[in-house]
Image (tube, rainbow, N blue to C red):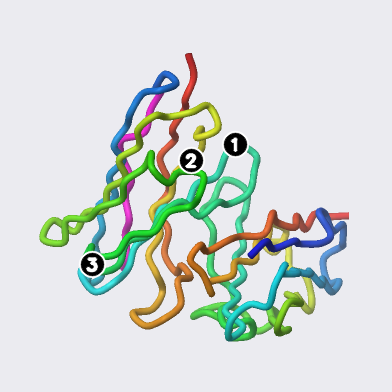
Amino acid sequence: EVQLLESGGGLVEPGGSLRLSCAASGFSFDIYDMNWVRQAPGKGLEWVSAIDYSGGNTYYADSVRGRFTISRDNPRNTLFLQMDSLRAEDTAIYYCAKKAVTVIGNYFDSWGRGTLVTVSS
Amino acid sequence: IVLTQSPGTLSLSPGERATLSCRASQSVRSNYLAWYQQRPGQTPRLLIYAASSRATGIPDRFSGSGSGTDFALTISRLEPEDFAVYYCQQYGGPPWTFGQGTKVEIK
């Protein structure tokens, strides 16, 4: 059974930093692209960032490019999101999401339960 | 690609048919469109990919259709557990984008 467990969320002041982690199990982590998707309180889903299976290619939404960095540690089956220069509008639940297939098509068949990031002074 | 879902809220009774729309601002490459269900307090669940293919374990009352810029999710007979928010997502990107969601509520 696929399991994704996020951690690292919390309360941070504007301009601050946080590092999110996602521990993966139940599948071959090192052959799947991975993603972060966020959901502001009471709002819809927003794709944030993706990384390919090897870590060699990364992608970002315009809203976070230059402030967030996605990475992965395949031997430790862990995905990361380094978030710098945080803004109030980054407040959201951050989900780790697994790409459903190993071929073309970045849609998501497994999601973690999410970790809440609150940016406020 | 911007995805616009309509209506924002759909008020229906159990047993009724629900039709949700997702319109793209430009043609979605190879009909790379997925649908997700999110029940209150739960994480999203993949329902449909490639516009019309059901994901593993999804009941056949859920069906997807469409191509190009116009897509639809149909729930043939609403069950109590189907009252939720539904999102479309295009994966012809990057970037990969979601619609703003349609809430299906009990009338």
Q: What residue did someone put label 1 on? A: A41
User: Which contiguous range is marked in magenta?
Assistant: A1-11
Kind of residue indicated by mark 2:
Ile
Q: In the displayed image of the protein, which residue is found farthest to the left?
A: A75
Which tag, 2 or 3, sits closer to the chain's start? Answer: 3
Residue at the location (63% across, 77% down)?
Answer: B28
Measure the alpha-carbon separation of dots 2 and 1: 7 Å
* Secondary structure predominantly adopted by residues drawn in magenta: strand
Residue at the location (45% across, 43% down)?
Answer: A64
Residue A54 location, x and y as percent?
21, 68
Q: What residue did someone put label 3 on? A: A29
Residue A25 location, x and y as percent?
24, 61
- Quarter that holds the N terminus of chain A: bottom left
Q: Are marks 2 and 1 in contact (CB under 8 Å)?
A: yes
Q: Chain of mark 2?
A: A
Q: Nearer the viewer, residue B96 or A100?
A: B96
The secondary element bearing badge 2 is classed as strand
